[in-house]
Image (spheres, grey):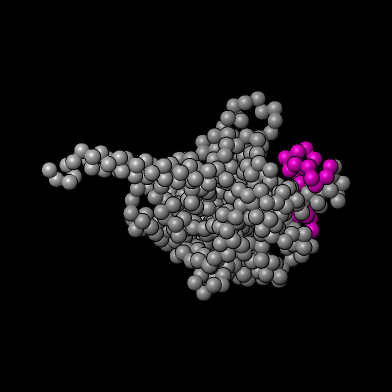
Amino acid sequence: MSFFSRPGVRAGLIAAFAALGTLLVMALYANVSERQSEAKVTNFNVVALSETTVDPAEWGKNFPRQYNGYLRTADRYSTKYGGAGSEGFARSRLEDDPRLVTLFSGYAFAIDFNQRQGHAYMLDDQRVTKRVTERKQPGACLHCHASNTVAYREAGLKDGAPGTLDEPFDSEHGREQLMKGFAKVNAMTYQEATQLVKHPVACLDCHDPKSMALRVTKPGFLVGIRALATSAEPVPHLPSIERWRKGDRKEPYDANRDASRQEMRSFVCGQCHVEYYCGPKMPLTFPWANGLKVEQIEQTWNATTFPDGHKFFDWKHEKTGAEVLKAQHPEFETWSQGVHARSGVSCADCHMPYQREGAMKISSHHVRSPLLDVTRSCQTCHRFPEEELLARVALIQERTHVLMGRAEDAVVALIGDLEAAKAKGATETELAPALELQRKAQWRVDFVNAENSMGFHAPQESARVLAEAIDYARQGQLALRGVVTAAAGSPATAPPASNPSPASAPTLSPVAH
């Protein structure tokens, strides 16, 4: 009989293996329990946060993981169509695309326009740009470049708003302080207003300091989204607005009260990544009263007048005299027209993807391009190799870039023809149809150019907008044929129409189709 076949030995081995198995199971249980306990500790209660805690470093004491990501927005990175550039300094878009100097002639963007950098630079970049140092700018420009909720409320209190700064942001007094101070700071010079703030976008701008719930704090968005809710434009990607519309509407739509958490994960970004007016002639305005599409925003601007009664415009083009529009950075509007928005995908899903740190699942606060983190940003939904996903994005962006170049060429050609017509003595009345077409064409090409995804947020929509830009620019050139002939001393002839549709008529209504 072998040693291992003896009953006593076999019993001992079984007992030993059973004991070892028990120890392993207990060790696994202890490890799982430890990780579960670790996952429950989402923050450290080191400091008491309040409505006056602006400095992100203070929030970082309680939320070190998120704060570490926030600090990394200072990292330099580059993608083909955006980012700071590998040299570590903001790259000039005017040098990359000299046509922009012609397009923005007479406007501050013609003297300084750089590639975007991370959130960490948003306030400093604004303070040092020549658009601010060499041109007078209003305090309204501060709306989207700083953590200014407390500054607005303090200004409101000084201007007679009721209550104290310790009251909750969403209280009646808190909102009154915010809106009153917002108007006060808007009317300041930029140099005065920027002295009121110390930080770029901060935790307080997006989170309630007590509950950590997401919230919207920028006055422009609060007013703008309310106007969008009262419009007739369908917004299926924003179900809370559709639900509010079906209700009794006794209370105005309020994103902080009515929106879902998933919607808020886009709204907090849409506070700043939007089209708006922040000039000196009227309060900062989000133009969403008719909807979020490019022609609906144009319709809102065309229906807007300054206090002196003049039709809204951003600036008078130096070369042609056209009263043109300048798009800011309409990411929220463009995203709203894309498949990701319709599929319920928020801005944060791609730009602040979930990540694991130990046992904890958090949203990355290293806000950046999804192209730099395809695994977390894209592959959670799209089960394709990283190379395939990057190739798809590259194809969309390259096609958009080429089409945008053609649109810019068309508008620059129209500007040149307008200059030539003026030089030959064409009157303002004769030039009016072509000037209106420049306004329409330039607005559309700039809408895509100013949007920070090179068409990816809504590829078909971006292509449609650029196609319209080319069409309107070429219509403008056709409208000038008879004008140039008449100015040269020959009988004027009507320009040939490319087709009988209203969109191709030389003279258009100022209200978009």
| Quarter of the image where one finds residue 22 | top left
Residue 96 position, x and y percent, is 50, 71
Task: Point out residue 304 in the picture as x, y percentages from the top left corner.
Answer: 69, 47
For the point 72% across and 52% down, the residue is: 53
Left or right: 30, with 152 as reference point: left
Say above or below: 122 vs 6.
below
Q: Is residue 301 left or right of residue 186?
A: left
| Side (left or right) of 378 relative to 5 | right
Residue at 69% x, 66% y is: 127
Residue situated in front as seen by the camera: 341 or 137? 341
State which quadrant residue 70 falls in: bottom right
487 to the left or right of 343: right
Magenta extent: 163-189
**Pick the front one: 104 or 94:** 94
| Residue 137: image location, x then y, percent | 73, 63
Name which residue lies at 69% across and 33% down.
252
Residue 512 visible in rendering = no
Give the quarter of the figure containing the C terminus: top right
| Residue situated furthest bottom in the rendering | 87
The x, y position of residue 425, in whole percent, is 62, 67
Q: In which quadrant is the N terminus drawn?
A: top left
Give 512 or 505, whichever is nearer the viewer: 512
Question: Looking at the image, is 34 positioned above or below residue 490?
Answer: above
Residue 132 lies in the magenta stretch: no
Q: Taking the image as drawn, is residue 88 in sight?
A: yes
Q: Residue furthest top?
A: 248
Looking at the picture, tell me which residue is in the foreground, 34 or 177.
Answer: 34
